[in-house]
Image (tube, rainbow, N blue to C red):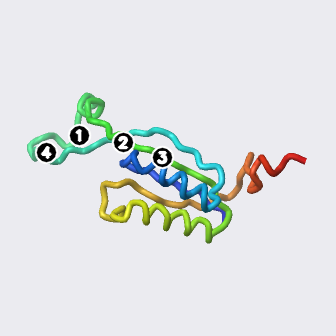
C-alpha cells in the first residue's frame, strides 16, 4: 500500500544520519523542510488564568525549531525499514519530546514515479 511517511524531529544534528540511512535503504524522494512548533512551558503555568487565552499570548509563545521530512513509499517493507532506521538513530524516540513519526495511506499520487529520474532517461 502506498503511504506517506512523515517525520518531525527536534534534534537537527541527526538530520544527515537519517538522510544517509534512508538513501542507503532506497527511500525515494525525501523532502525536508524547516518547521516550527509551539513550545509549551508548563513550569510557569498558573491556574488563575482565564480559560480562553488572549491572541497576544499565543503570538508571543516561544517556537521550537524542528525539521520535517516526508516521502511517498509504495513498499510496506521499505516503510518498516525506514521507521526502524529512525528508531535506531534516535533510540529514545518513544520517550517523548523527540518528535513524531507517522505514516498515512495515500489514495492517489500525481507527479511521482518509483523509478529514479536518472534511470528513466530513454
Label 1: which secondary element: loop
Label 2: which secondary element: strand
Label 4 or label 2, whichever comes before in sequence order: 2
- Mark 3–mark 2 Cα distance, whole angstroms, equals 11 Å
Q: Give residue 45's mark.
A: 4
- Mark 4–mark 2 Cα distance, whole angstroms, equals 19 Å
Label 3: which secondary element: strand
Q: Nearer the viewer, mark 4 or mark 3?
A: 3
- Mark 2–mark 1 Cα distance, whole angstroms, equals 20 Å
Label 2 or label 1, whichever comes before in sequence order: 2
Do the residues bearing badges 3 and 1 touch, measured as CB atoms within 8 Å? Answer: no
Q: Nearer the viewer, mark 3 or mark 2?
A: 3
Q: Which residue is mark 1?
A: 52
Report crowding for label 2: few under 14, some 14 to 19, many 20 or more residues within 10 A (C-alpha). few
Label 3 or label 2, whichever comes before in sequence order: 2
Label 3 or label 1, whichever comes before in sequence order: 1
Residue at coordinates 43% horizontally, 65% vertically from top-left? 88
Residue at coordinates 36% horizontally, 48% vertically from top-left? 10
Judge whether 59 appears above or below 22 on screen.
Answer: above
- Mark 4–mark 3 Cα distance, whole angstroms, equals 29 Å
Q: Nearer the viewer, residue 89 or 97?
A: 89
Judge whether 101 appears above or below 12 on screen.
Answer: below
Amino acid at each position: 500500500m502506498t503511504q506517506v511517511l512523515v517525520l518531525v524531529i527536534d534534534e537537527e544534528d541527526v538530520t544527515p544520519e537519517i538522510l544517509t540511512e534512508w538513501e542507503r535503504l532506497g527511500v525515494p524522494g525525501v523532502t525536508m523542510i524547516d518547521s516550527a512548533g509551539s513550545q509549551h512551558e508548563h513550569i510557569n503555568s498558573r491556574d488563575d488564568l482565564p480559560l480562553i487565552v488572549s491572541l497576544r499570548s499565543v503570538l508571543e509563545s516561544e517556537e521550537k525549531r524542528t525539521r520535517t521530512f516526508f516521502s511517498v513509499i509504495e513498499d510496506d517493507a521499505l516503510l518498516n525499514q525506514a521507521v526502524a532506521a529512525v528508531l535506531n538513530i534516535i533510540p529514545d524516540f518513544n520517550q517523548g519530546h523527540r518528535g513524531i513519526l507517522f505514516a498515512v495511506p495515500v489514495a492517489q499520487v500525481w507527479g511521482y514515479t518509483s523509478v529514479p529520474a536518472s534511470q528513466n532517461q530513454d
